Every structure is written in structure tokens, then in C-alpha cells.
Image (cartoon, helix red, strand yellow):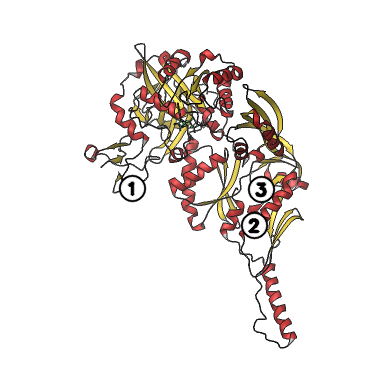
Amino acid sequence: MQFLLRPRSTALSFVGRFSDVKKCRIKRRSQGCTAPGTRIRHRWIKTVGEPAICPTARQFCSSAEKQDVDMSKFPVDRIRNFSIIAHIDHGKSTLADRLLEMTGAIAKTGRNKQVLDKLQVERERGITVKAQTASLFYQHRGQTYLLNLIDTPGHVDFSYEVSRSLSACQGVLLIVDANQGIQAQTVANFYLAFEAQLTIIPVINKIDLKNADPDRVEKQIEKIFDIPKEECVRISAKFGTNVDQVLQEVVKRIPPPTAKVEEPFKALLFDSTFDHYRGVVANIALFGGHVTKGDRIVSAHLGKMYEVNELGVLRPDEQPTERLYAGQVGYVIAGMKDVKDAQIGDTLYLHKHPVEPLPGFSPAKSMVFAGMYPTDQSEYTALRRAVEKLALNDSSVTVQRDNSLALGAGWRLGFLGLLHMEVFIQRLEQEYNATVIITAPTVPYKAVLASPKLIKEFREEVVTIINPAQFPEKSQVVEYQEPMVMGTIIAPDEFTGKIMSLCLSRRAIQKNMVYIDDHRVMMKYLFPLNEVVVDFYDQLKSMSSGYASFDYEDAGYQLAELIKIEFLLNGKPVEELTTVVHKDRAYSTGKAMCERLKESIPRQMFEIAVQAAIGSKVIARETIKAYRKNVLAKCYGGDITRKMKLLKKQAEGKKRMRLIGNVEVPKDAFMNVLKRK
Ligand SMILES: Nc1nc2c(ncn2[C@@H]2O[C@H](COP(=O)(O)OP(=O)(O)OP(=O)(O)O)[C@@H](O)[C@H]2O)c(=O)[nH]1
């Protein structure tokens, strides 16, 4: 029988025999460490059937292979800090597995699969959501090198994770799939690294595939990125082919950090997580000096002082050490109670030795907003706790309290994109057992206000509207603006015509089109964010048989003719259905939503008018017919005046119901209409 355990003294979990680990106590059920079939018994987690697939478990098994290196004497010129970046699924995490194995950080079991993807949602979806750091010791020509690697996510929604990881590095491995070639996120990630002036090593992965064409990919890299093909490394991360060459190139080509141990302590806080027992665990890159357990440190941005309780390196699990030195990447726990205390991009310094803060980086910008409510209001408090905890671990989510007449108390949440939103909700459901109603996503519009009353109310002239219900009327504004994005599409040229008409239908303006090789084109389009946020990528994928890739970046705001559509049930507006659309979409959206509402609301004793309206003008209408109760059923023959009296009474009853707007709308009707299709 095997047990998955979490010893009290360390953050490590491992699989072992009961007798080996009697003294250990489970601290908590750690994220991602529970395999299907795992259940908690007493204070132990017992794995039933399959042994736990806990990645951290395997790493502990390899602890014997860990080298003890005296970091105080470790020369900075033998440190390399680098990130692995690529388009989604091009093999970043698989390469990270091989690098961890080859440097002895984890045991070579043949079963290591995306070891650094620790969250349950990451393992289920097979994608990286959170960047992960690992410190490796590598022997090269008789010398030990310290390699700090950061595995990053590939999806556009998480590119903020990539850019902040790059701030702790001097170089990157740019992975490109030997079969798919350069894709949209390859280009986006290349430019992130290029603009940060990092050394870029192109790595062509999956050369074992039958359809691999590394020559073609090398040509693409030469043409698009202007990197000579001789600089590319060809590997198979899956089978470990040439992976050693990658390590050699890292040592040879990526420069060491310029940090000096003699300088005062100066560190960039580039990532953080929240542990309920120990508070904030901040990942830092040291740009100078050293920090020791017990030191008093200050965060430059907030000016708050903390005492370092624990620090160490990530190998890839936390391994506590006494000190961290210039050039190293590691973690500190310093009694920060809230992730907001650990502002990403902040500079840490020693209490008595203030330093010039590092440039840092701007906070993540929410691209998509949605309302979230408990399915049952009695679960509000539990859900509030879950949202707070999860938001602590994901500082790129913005949370504001919100109230809805139909759905009760809830929140308006801001996300970096739709996948980010889905991942957040999946984590709420899986990690906190919460069930929620999520409203239709909307993008942040801007309105330049004309009405002095509104300016006073909002306390500014240009307001950002994240809740369509608060969208100001046209008469009250000078103009509306909508967020724009610069989209990059890469696809085989046979699909160019179809893609162009799809983009046109999404109000996009073509900016550029180049051939990246004989058969593939790269197109640049300026899109309104609203047009790409929901289903654009799905449509693009299906029309190109899965061959097109898409990425976008923020491109500011543009003037737009926007219209607020309200939905009414028997004349009463339903606030949470209010939608903002471009004027050209108003009629089609109004009609489609009315039809969906009609399908979702059951027939009642009176007729229900479902209307879409722009101001006082109704633009679409559906009618839900009443059940006609036969009040005359018991009147056989008889007096006509009696029949008329009964029918009049029934009509009055219906009128009264309509008048008080007593439409019974089942909760799932809202969900059906609000939910994205
Ligand atoms: N045949 C083959 N498959 C590979 C190779 N490297 C990775 N894969 C497979 O490609 C898929 C994606 O690999 P990942 O390592 O998860 O890719 P990733 O870039 O980390 O993905 P994201 O984190 O989601 O962006 C997995 O099914 C891997 O097994 C390789 O060298 N050869």
C-alpha cells in the first residue's frame, strides 16, 4: 500500500511506505497532488488503486541525487537564468521534464510527464497555466553551473506570465514544433524576448515525428526572426534526443546575470503564490547582494517592512537554504498576509540599505469581465471565501462586489481572456467544490461623458464600463470607445480567402500579410476585442481544419458606435441581460437573445412579451403564449352573460399578473440565455 504524504517540516510530498514515513504529518491536501481515487483517512492521504500521480512525489524520490553546493562561494558567471517559451503544445513542459531528469533534479522514471504542471486543471487540460521555476545544477567541462529555468504557459491569455518571467532571465529557449512550424504565439513570444533584449536560442522540437520538417522550420526562423539556421538546435524532447546539446548551448550562449554579491541586496519579485499556512510565497530574482533568514526587508512599492522567515531555492520543490545570493532565483516567505503585499514587479531591499527600485512592469490588464453569482444564495459566504482564496493565488483576476435583482449578491470579475475565465471557474469547482452562474462576458468599453451630473457621479470624464447595465445613454456622452487588439493569424495559404472573409465579418482591418514560407501566410488584423473574445478562434480553427493559429495583443481604444440593448419581460427590464454591441449587430443580437429567452421560459397562465429594446424603441419581440385555462368548461349551454362574466374575470386576472410583472423565470433560463454559446 502506498501513501501520499505531506511532511510538516517541508513543502514536499512523496509516495512511500507507511513505515518509512510514520513521523510525517499531513499538512494539507496540496494542490494537484491527489490522483483520482484518492481519499482522506484520518490525517493521512491514502491512495486507493493507482498510486498518486503527484509530480512532487517523484521529485522527492530523487533527493539522493541532489548535489550540495556552497552557494556563498558560487561564482555568478556560472549562473544562467532562462525561460522556455513557445506556442501552445510545442513541447515546453516536456523539454523541462528532460532537463530536470538530465540534471538529476527528478528521477528518470520514464513516467515523468509535464512535471512542472502541478495544478489539477493543468494536468487535465494538458496546458500550462502558471509559470514554474526550477533550479538545476549542471556539470559542463568539469564545472558546476546553476541553471534557473522558468517553464511558461503558451496560451495568449497567459502571456502576462511569460513577460514577467522574462524579467528574471537573460535568455530564452524558443521552442518550435518541427511539424507545425512557426505559429502565432511563437511570433508573439519571440517579440517579448526580443524587446527584453534577451539571448534567443531557437529549438526545433519533435524531430521524431513522421511529418517533421526541420529544414522548413529553420528557413521560417531565418526569414521571420532573422536568426541564422546554424543557431537552431534540433531535438526530440519526448525521447531526449539532443537535449544535452540544449544545456550546452544555454551555458555557452546565454550570458550570466550582471548581479554582484558585494552590492546591497536588491531583488525583483516576479511571481507569488499564497499558502494558507505560511502566507505569501514570493519568487524573487536577486539583482545584487544577498539575503539571509531573519533579515528585515522592505518592498519598495508599498514601503512595508517584513522579516524573512524562510527562503530557499526551487528544485523544483521548495528547498530551504540559509541565504540567497546575487544572480540566484529563489523564494522568500516573509509574513506577507496577502498577495497584494507582494506586488508583482516590486523591488525588495534590506531595511537599512535602500536601493534604486528596478523598473518593474505594469500590472496585468483585464480584457474580459463577467458577473459571477452562487447558484443558490445560501452558498454566498462559502463562495466568497473560495473566490478570495483563489484570487490570492491568481493576482491577475480582478474582483468587485456586485448585486443583481435576479441572481442576488455576487461579483464582477475581470480576466485576461476567456480561457483564463474558464480555468478560474474550473478551479473554483474542482478545488473549492463551488457551483456558480457566470454571466455573458463583456469587454471594457469607455465613454467620454458629456453630462456634468454623470461626471460628478463617476468623478471622471472618461469612464471604463465593465458592467453593461451601467452603460450611459447616448445623450449623456460625447463618444464611446471600444478596446482594440492587433491579431496575428498564421495559416496555410489555401485558407487565406476564407480567413479574410471571416475577419471582415468581424469588423477587422487588415494591416499586413507576408509569406513565412512557400505555403504559409502570416496576416495582421486590427480587431475590436469584442469580436474575437468569444468564438472567433473556434471558427478560425474549424474553417482551417485546425491549421490556423491566432494571437493578439492590446492595441488601445478606438471610437465606436455602440448601443446598449435592454431586455424586457412584460415591460420590466432584466438588468443582467443588458448587452452592449456595435450598432451593426444590434438587431441580430436582440433577435437571437429574445429567441433564446423564449425557449428558456416556460409557458405561464398569462402571455409574456419578451422584448429587446434600444432606449424606448423595441427592436425584437417574441411572445410566450399563455396556457388558456378553460373557465367555461363547467358551463354547459346556459346564459351568455354568465360566460362573458367568467371570461372577463379571467382576463382581469391575467392583466393583474402582467401588471405586477409576475413572470416566473426559472434560474436555469437565465443561465441558458446568459451563458456563452
Ligand atoms: N512526438 C513528440 N511529441 C512531443 C515532443 N515533445 C512534446 N511532445 C508532445 O506534445 C504535447 C504537448 O507537450 P507539452 O510539453 O505539454 O507542450 P507545452 O508547450 O508545454 O504546452 P502548453 O504548456 O500548454 O503551452 C504532449 O502530448 C507531448 O507529449 C516530442 O519531441 N516528440
Disc 2: which residue: 597
Whether 207 is drawn above or below 374: the answer is above
Whether 104 is drawn above or below 538: the answer is above
Disc ID at residue 39:
1
Classify mark 2: helix, strand or loop: helix
- Residue 465 vs residue 119: left or right? right
Distance from label 1 to label 2 (Cα)?
42 Å
Q: Amino acid at mark 3?
A: Pro
Quarter-wise, where is residue 277 in the image? top left
Classify mark 3: helix, strand or loop: helix
Q: Earlier in the sequence, mark 1 or mark 2?
A: 1
Q: Residues within 10 Å of mark 1 (few under 14, many from 20)?
A: few
Disc 3: which residue: 468
Q: Amino acid at mark 1?
A: Arg
Residue 495, percent across and down? 65, 32
Residue 543, percent across and down? 63, 37
Kindly identify the residue that appears in the image at 62 percent across and 42 percent down: 535
Q: Amino acid at mark 2?
A: Leu
Q: Residue furthest left?
A: 19
